[in-house]
Image (cartoon, helix red, strand yellow):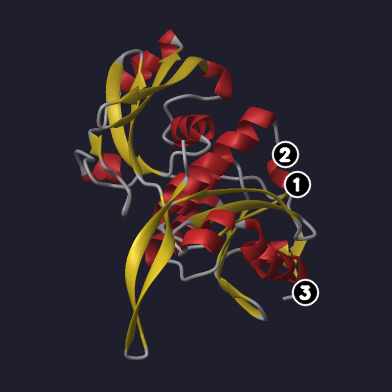
Amino acid sequence: MSITREVSVSNWHEGAHHTLDDRVVAEEAVALTYNKRSHVVMMVTPENLEDFAIGFSLTEGIIDEPADVLESTVIKRENGLEIAMTVSAECFARLEGQRRNLVGRTGCGLCGAESLATAVRNPAVVSSSVSVTADAIQTAVQTLNDHQPIQAETGAAHGAAWCSVTGKILVLREDIGRHNALDKLIGHLCRTGFDPASGFVLVSSRASYEMVFKAAAAGMEVLVAVSAPTTLAIDFAHRSGMTLVGFARPGRHNVYTFETRIQGE
């Protein structure tokens, strides 16, 4: 399936009109089903869908490890795609007991939650074994654009990157949704095996509560965002023991929590 599409546009520039070809990122409705039960419909860039399904399932607490997904199939439907997963009986029973009605979640991450108790959940507490330098953060930030081909082509994709402690970007996933990009990254890392103490995560977006929650669920100790954090993101970073870095741009960044993990501040 094509990730971008060429469209003809009428372009206005400095008082003159031109007809140009433009590349536009794909957006697809993707339904996630577990043991033939519908759970959620997300708007997703249809790439790395297996990573997305695993990452979403892990960070939502539906499964405990990738092996809990016994089978996964991407099915083309009339109005979008379905990722049909079969999960272990234990995981499915737990899902049925804490079922959330999530429809089209792309923004705040809480749409469809039935109560405040289910909306604002407690984050996982992470370890404290990562140490990175301010220079490593800057190295990753300055090379981020080089690893985002969909963003470069369309200007409409977020990226989530796993970086070594020296700031080298090891793997990156892109999506129209910042949560989706992070889920794809987490899914890939957990499927292939990774050590949360071996690096940090960099996202091309603001740091919301749910970005902190998802990163903590994966055991990541340092979350670096190119834009601002929210108050709840900072509160959750404190509660999870995570180092939260925001406004990470070439030449500058702010450390909001647990700055002892960042050497050279």
For disc 2, the marked residue is 195
The location of residue 115, given as percent across then percent down, is: 20, 41
Do the numbered discs 3 and 1 sit on residues whose CB atoms are within 8 Å?
no
Q: Residue, x 64% and y 80% (percent of image)?
A: 252
Give the mark nearer the N terminus: 3 vs 1: 1
Q: Eyeballing the image, is 117 above or below 253?
A: above
Which image quadrant is residue 46 in? top left
The location of residue 230, given as percent across then percent down, is: 40, 66
The location of residue 118, given as percent across then percent down, is: 28, 39
The label number, if any, that marks residue 198 in the structure image? 1
Whole-number angstrom distance, CA of label 3 to CA of label 2:
23 Å
Amino acid of disc 2: Asp
Give the SS element for disc 2: loop
Give the SS element for disc 1: helix
Viewer-side residue, 241 vs 210 = 210
Residue neighbourhood size for the residue with mark 3, other residues' Cα within 10 Å, grouped as few (<14), some (14–19), many (≥20): few
The location of residue 1, given as percent across then percent down, is: 46, 35
Amino acid of disc 1: Ser
For disc 3, the marked residue is 264
Viewer-side residue, 44 vs 194 = 44
